[in-house]
Structures are given as C-alpha cells and as structure tokens.
Amino acid sequence: MTQETSQLELFPLLTEEQIAKKVQELGKRISEDYRGKELLVVGVLKGSFMFLSDLVRAIKVPLAINFIGASSYVGTKSSGYIRINHDLTTNIKDRHVLLVEDIVDTGETIDYLCDVFTLRGPASLKVCAFLSKPEVRDMSHRVDYVGFEIGKEFVVGYGLDFNEKYRELPYVAKVLKH
Ligand code: 5GP
C-alpha cells in the first residue's frame, strides 16, 4: 500500500502495533537494567519526542525527563556538522543518564553528544535509539538499546521528519521519492 501526498510517496514500514510491542520490550529491559536506580531520560529533539513519550510510560523505575536539541541534517542530506541548538536545563553530574535518539545513522550525532555528556560526569551513560541503520556506520558507535534495525532508506513518521513534515504519523514510512 502506498500513500500519495502532495510532496512525497510514502510506503509504510513499521505499523503502530509493531512499534507499541517493541516499546514495551525496551521498557521492560530498561526497567530491569536500572532496577533500584533513578534515571534521567534525555530526549534528542525533535525526532525522539514521540518515542520518548511512549518509552517513559513503559519504564517502571523512577525517572526525570530532559531534552537536548541537536541537528545534523538538512532535508535528507547530512550538512556535515552537529550543532547543539537547545542545551539541557539540568545538571547530569552523578546521574544515570539514558540518551534517547530517534535514529542512529552515521552515529556522529550520538558520538558527539556522548562526548559532551561524558565531560559532565554522569554516574552512567547509555543510549537508546528507536531506529538504527547499521549498514551506514562502523559498529564502534555504541548504542545500548535499539528498537528496529532498518536499511539505508530515508524514513519519516513517529517523530521523524522530512523538512519538518510527517512527524505526527503514528507509524514509520519509507520515502519512495521526493
Ligand atoms: P547521524 O548523526 O547518526 O548520522 O544522524 C542522526 C540524525 O540524522 C537523526 O537524529 C535524524 O535527525 C537524522 N536522520 C538520519 N537518518 C534519517 C532518516 O532516515 N529519516 C529522518 N527523518 N531523519 C534521519
């Protein structure tokens, strides 16, 4: 099934049901791994907002939520650098930080943020990505929890955009042409 829009042709890749099941699995694993601890969940804006809001409801340990804004892409092409455009509003020193990313592509964004966070002295730092494109990067980039591994295709929906559109879709779709 394809869905014609005025600009893009989209092909559904992950359904709402598949996503909901995966989020529950991740929440369970994270809750077990952090049992007895308090978490600081940090969402990378804007793409992670929908995943984060579902994920935190599936995590059963006490937690706080904060956001960091980082961008590396314009359209579907990397602009070649990462920029923090909205910093955390809380101190992460001695806290158990779980960085939540929408998608790990080359891994540059997450590497950069991990370096920045490590300098701030958290008690621990782990990364949870909703999607990962393992073919694109060398596997030295660390991602502790991954929802789904996908191919090289550009995807939208469930928080992910194409020039700020399609974030609101409750499922993930592959962009067929643009
Ligand atoms: P990386 O630094 O890992 O190469 O890129 C990560 C960022 O690139 C993500 O947070 C996301 O904003 C963007 N990105 C990478 N692949 C895709 C994709 O398939 N769709 C969308 N919408 N954004 C992507």
Image (cartoon, rainbow, N blue to C red):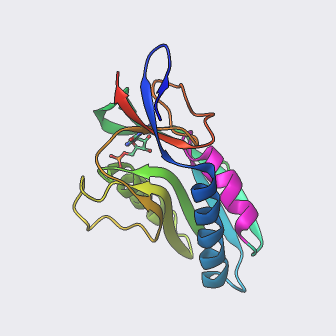
How many marks overall?
A: 0
Q: Tell me the residue at 31%/64% (across/down).
A: 141
Figure quadrant, ligand 1:
top left
* 41 on left or right of 105: right
Residue 111, quarter of the rendered image: bottom left
Q: Tell me the residue at 59%/56% (across/down).
A: 19
Quarter holding the C terminus is top left
* 128 on left or right of 34: left
| Membership of 48 in magenta stretch | yes
Q: Position of residue 128 (x, y in %)?
A: 51, 63
What stretch of residues is rendered in magenta? 44-59
Q: Position of residue 8 (x, y in %)?
A: 43, 22
> Vertically, is 178 above or below 59?
above
> Vertically, is 13 above or below 125?
above
Principal secondary structure, stretch drawn in magenta: helix
Along the line of sight, the residue nearer the viewer: 104 or 91: 104
* 169 on left or right of 65: left
Q: Position of residue 22 (x, y in %)?
A: 58, 64
Residue 92 visible somewhere in the drawing: no
> Vertically, is 106 above or below 169?
below
Along the line of sight, the residue nearer the viewer: 93 or 14: 14
Name the residue furthest front.
1
Q: Position of residue 64 (x, y in %)?
A: 74, 62
| Membership of 73 in magenta stretch | no
Q: Tell me the residue at 36%/54% (across/down).
A: 150
Residue 45 visible somewhere in the drawing: yes
> Vertically, is 145 above or below 106?
below
Q: Tell me the residue at 67%/78% (across/down).
A: 31
